[in-house]
Image (spheres, rainbow, N blue to C red):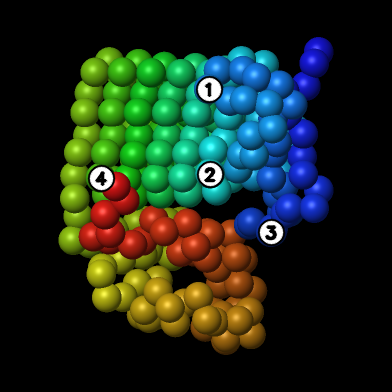
Amino acid sequence: MQKKYELIKGSSKKVCGQRVYRIRALKDFGRVKKGYVGGFVHSEFNLSHFGTCWAWGDSVVTHNARLLDDAQIFGRTWMIEDAVVGDKASIKDGVVIRGSARIGGNAEISGIVLVTGRAFISDNAKVFGNVIVDGRTKLVNSVVIKNQYDFINILHHKYNMTITRDYIQVGCQTHTKEEWLDFNEDAIFKMDGSEAVLFYNTVLRPMLVSGIFDIGVNNE
């Protein structure tokens, strides 16, 4: 098998506790030309060498997440945990795909979207705007989900979150996005101990950095 990309060891950062590396194309395939620099992956497990799948821009694929077939992710899309995107799916803007979510077919997703849990999106389904697709939600055929929220509620097994343009409430703690990003682990530990630190590092901070909470921001 001829590899289609390599990891750029000199260009990396940490995402959700793992180091991820920029990728560089080793040959022409699909819309990608040899020498193109793409997004970030933790290892070659995350991005298949088969098909034309590619991570563009500052997109990230890490943990056990996999980008397969001819699927494309763009912009600030994050794929973490055990998420899988395949077939000819196209994911753009500030999308976060996590949990055991599966996306395939000719599905299109863009905007400030969270796909989590065991959500399944396939066929010609389209999801746009500020949307949460969670639990065991199944979107198939030609369904179109298009919403613009003034606030977002996320029900998590540890802490419920409410996000508005002005503040983010997690459990009983309410702060601005900037304040949440400025907290260090000691400050988070004082809020609710080690579980709070784990939640902050693996759930809250990655979502803050990805831009998913930037309600009202035009991503065009």
Q: At 29% from the left edge and 47% from the top edge, which residue is drawn? A: 220
- Res 171 visible: no
Earlier in the chain: of badge 2 and badge 4, it is 2
- Of 136 and 60, nearer the camera is 60
Quadrant, the N terminus: top right
| Three-letter residue code for mark 3 | Lys
Residue 130 in the image: above or below residue 23: below
Callout in the foreground (2, 3): 2
- Of 23 and 207, nearer the camera is 23
Q: Which residue has dot 1 on it?
A: 31
Q: At 21% from the left edge and 28% from the top edge, which residue is drawn? A: 144
| Three-letter residue code for mark 2 | Gly
Left/right placement of residue 65 relative to residue 31 reads right
| Three-letter residue code for mark 4 | Gly
**Location of residue 184 in the rendering, given as x and y in whole percent from the top left corner:** 60, 81
Disc number for residue 57: 2
Earlier in the chain: of badge 1 and badge 4, it is 1
Q: CA distance from mark 2 to mark 3?
A: 16 Å
